[in-house]
Amino acid sequence: MPIKSWRSLPFAALATAFIAAPALADDWETCAKGSGDEAIAACTQAIKSGTYNGKTLALAYSNRGVEWKAKGELEKAIADYNEAIKADPQQAAAYNNRGIAYAAGQDFEKAVADYDKAIELKPDYASALNNRGLAYFNQGQHQRAIADYDAAIKLEPDAVRLNNRGNAYAARAQYDRAIQDFDESVNLDGQYAIAVYNRANAYFAKGEPERAIKDYDKALTLDPKYQDALVNRGVAYEKRGELAKAIADYDAALKLEPKDAVALNNRGNALLKGGKPDDAVAAYDRAIQVNPKYVSAFFSRAIAFEAKKRYESAVADYGEVIKLQPQNAAAWNARCWARAIIGRLQDAIGDCNEALKLNPDYINALDSRGYVLLRAGKYEDSIADYDAALAMEPKKAASLYGRGMAKRRKGDYAAGNVDIAAAKELKPNIVAEFQGYGLMPPATEVVPTPARSDEAQARGRKSR
């Protein structure tokens, strides 16, 4: 399971929600300075009173809109911002806040249009620049986001904006540059757990799990209930092979949020690595119950089923992955392999062909199809696929062994023995491994009890 996504501060917290106005009445005071239902009621009374117009009326609508947004009532918030803009078309804050409401509803195009207008009215509007940067970030336009964050930080540097720019650099895989921003953010606000957490993510992405764990520790010291930090620290521990610590973190995260499908899936992965496939399957089952469209959980459960030699169940789960992600070449390849092991060779060939149609240079799919063709007795075609795989990865033990077997079966014993010897040198248990797949060794071989290797378990597995 991929590490959880970078954390940005919610749009609403970045808005300039209120603009100073004269204290004309108690309702206005509460509308302007209060919160929640009390503020909404006061703003409503102020609006209905007929006392206010122009800029002041616009502020009443805008302030009520902020409170509706805080309650999650986006349509009501937008309606109030619309009225605020009618009353005062020059009120930049109303455009900014309406943009926040659109962004909360995932309508980033409308949000950007509103931020554009707010910035047109007030070119030095740092909050609107930052918010537009967040909208661009959520649209995947990371360079445009960085440009807006640059402008906002130049006007009003603060920890939140530096954190957000760090996220944008991290999304572009510029992890060192991202860490600079997270460092500056933490220097400005030593209690800012989100920036510490994001810095940990950047260290992990750089391949430095030890430094990541230190930052996850720090984030959890600042916020002991930081559930994302628990999950991601678990991933870092798992990367280091500290499975018990990883499982403990996933368990702690699940106490805070029992329906976190990511934590459930990751817990299953750690259990599977620890040789507990039954417990792993139970964790994947729960993850899929929480999120029936969770591709990683289906994929991981299929691998666990393979470890238990429940190949039909694995085939079914790979099928679910393919339904959800038809362009997932790894799933087509994995199902090809599982079908081949149980002798469904024609179906397996179709799956491998699909994987290679999606990715013609997919070494594992070439290797898998070579094995299927070998089992089907099509030795020349099998050798051709193994040749192609070995041209890209000359020391791929499985392809060397498969090619050696294909050569022997077509009568070229000398060349076949050379390949088999090379495969055994690279991987001493290769003969037993392939016997476990149903491919009997040459008659001259003496093999130990079949055992499935870690490499075989990982065949077709998506990268973490």
Image (tube, helix red, strand yellow):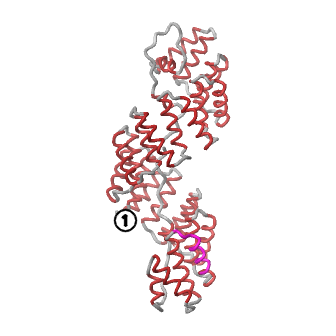
Q: Residue at x 50, y 55 (%)?
A: 169
Amino acid beneath label 1? Asp
Q: Is residue 252 magenta?
A: no
Q: Residue at x 63, y 23 (%)?
A: 345
Answer above or below: position of 374 versus 318.
above
Residue ID for mark 1: 189
Viewer-closest of 110 and 275: 275
Please, which residue is most extreme toward the left here?
221
Q: Is residue 82 magenta?
A: yes
Q: Is residue 43 left or right of residue 195?
A: right
Question: Which SS type dominates the magenta stretch?
Answer: helix
SS assignment at label 1: loop
Answer above or below: position of 320 versus 154.
above
Q: Locate residue 372, reporting x and y percent.
A: 62, 23
Q: Locate residue 354, reporting x and y percent.
A: 66, 34
Q: Residue at x 48, y 45 (%)?
A: 287
Q: How many marks?
A: 1
Viewer-closest of 43 and 393: 43
Q: Locate residue 457, reporting x and y percent.
A: 48, 30
Please, which residue is most extreme toward the top here?
444
Res. 449 image quadrant = top left
Q: Locate residue 163, reporting x and y percent.
A: 45, 61
Tell me the magenta residue range: 72-83
Label 1 neighbour load within 10 Å: few <14, some 14-19, many 20+ = some
